[in-house]
Amino acid sequence: MDKKKIIILVVALVVVIVGVLVVGLFMKNGKDEDKVESVITLDINPSMELEITKKGKVASIQSLNEESDKFIDRSLEGKPVEEVFYAIVKKAKEEHLVEDGELTIIVGMEKSDKSIEDKLREACNKNEIGSKIVVPKITEEAKREAQGYGVTPAKAAYILEVIGDNEELHFDDLKNKSSRELMEMKETGKYCDHGYVLRGDVCEKVAKEEKPTEGKTCPEGYEDVNGQCRKIGPFKDELYCEEGFTLSDGKCSGEVAQSAKASCDKGTYNAGSGKCEEATKVGEAKKACKVTGQDPEDRMMSNGKCSRGKPIIPEGCPDAIELDGWCYNPSGDYDAIATCDAGTYQNGACYTVTTSDAKYSCSEGTLNGSKCMVIKESKALTKHGCEEGYSLHQDRVCVSETETKDYIVGYTCPNEARLEHESCVYYEQVEAKSR
């Protein structure tokens, strides 16, 4: 074979090898891009799990509870995250899960990813609603609770934050709460008994529902207030502290009185009197029975009880003892009275008690009498307020003070009911509790 043919053959071989390597590289990159890079969970009240690829597409969507079944659209699998988020938020809006113009979402991520939060907010913006994104830190305790109660680790972590040190709250009562309810409970410190839903400072429970009638009503986004359809606006939450505490940098601080530790040089401490008491025995107590005026004096029976005399009947004293013309019941009517010639009766004997001042000390804080004054800090509470130009109506919605619209023909309900999803809903209301 001549030299020219050898060169051509070598070049051709090199081209083939390079081509194979390039194709292999592209195939490898393609597989890497389709590989699941992260798994996230979303809790609204529907809960779902999304697998996201390196290329930013949703490889799969899994339903985690019954409420999320209607949110699962298999045609979204393989679509970009942004498109899937938009569809989920749109569905949440259609299903009336948006409250006060905002959607609350608890996001679960093993590894923090700010872009996920940004894409969720953008999806809400495109659906013309506000958003509150909560990304709790998932602890081992949260994972255990999630497994035991059948919720996502992220929701379990947030429930644990809500419970905090409030012994009246229990995980089982909160597991079915929506993300919105949990967030309100955490921010305001208010909570409701099981079966009630928190709305501002009020707990509500559906009492009954009935079909609405056709009549004049307010357009969507407007509330009927004293015969006017007034525009609904967003809340403007305000921080506040309990009485006696001062707000600073989002925290409440104040002085709390706690019982100091009491000690005695002699005797024992009596919490009722606040004194140290030392008892000295001065004699045995005497037992006696009452004197009953005109009737014979009550007799002491052999069992230590006192029995009151009763007149003898013609038959004598059946089941009783006859003494000095009277019948006495040997079973006794009452305990004998203990008396002391000196001192006071205690535990079967007579004692004199001397008192002295107790000594007090504090493990923390400053001693003030019998109390320790301790500086405590806590997270500020949140109460609903309204933006300028809006006022709070029925403690559940902000309405414009000036912007109104005319009534339209549509479904209407009696004044004591609210029109919700084409039903007139009557609520039982009680005041929310505070932690």
Image (cartoon, helix red, strand yellow):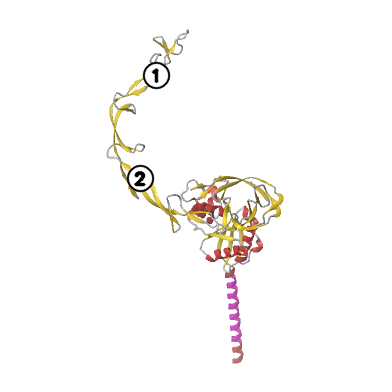
Q: Which residue is mark 1?
A: 306
Which of the pair 389/95 is nearer the observer?
389
Q: Nearer the viewer, mark 2 or mark 1?
A: 2
Above or below, comparing residue 197 to residue 320 in the picture: below
Q: Secondary structure at mark 1?
A: strand
Which of the pair 28/224 is nearer the observer?
224
Q: Quadrant of the N terminus?
A: bottom right
Residue 1 seen anywhere in this rendered image of the structure = no
Residue 405 at x, y = what percent?
Answer: 66, 57
Q: Which residue is mark 2?
A: 371
Residue in the picture at 60% in, 64% down:
125
Q: Secondary structure at mark 2?
A: strand
The majority secondary structure of the magenta stretch comes to helix
Ranked by sequence position, the earlier of labels 2 and 1 is: 1
Residue 50 seen anywhere in this rendered image of the structure = yes
Amino acid on which the number 2 mark rests in the picture: Lys
Above or below, comparing residue 351 to residue 378 in the picture: above
Residue 25 lies within the magenta run: yes
Stretch in magenta? 9-31
Amino acid on which the number 1 mark rests in the picture: Cys
Which dot marks residue 129?
none
Residue in the picture at 51% in, 49% down:
190
Q: Is residue 286 left or right of residue 23?
A: left
Residue 167 at x, y = what percent?
Answer: 47, 46
Q: Is residue 214 left or right of residue 318?
A: right
* In the image, farthest residue toward the top: 314
The answer to which quarter of the image holds residue 108 is bottom right
Q: Are marks 2 and 1 in contact (CB under 8 Å)?
A: no
Which of the pair 269/410 is nearer the observer?
410
The answer to which quarter of the image holds residue 402 is bottom right
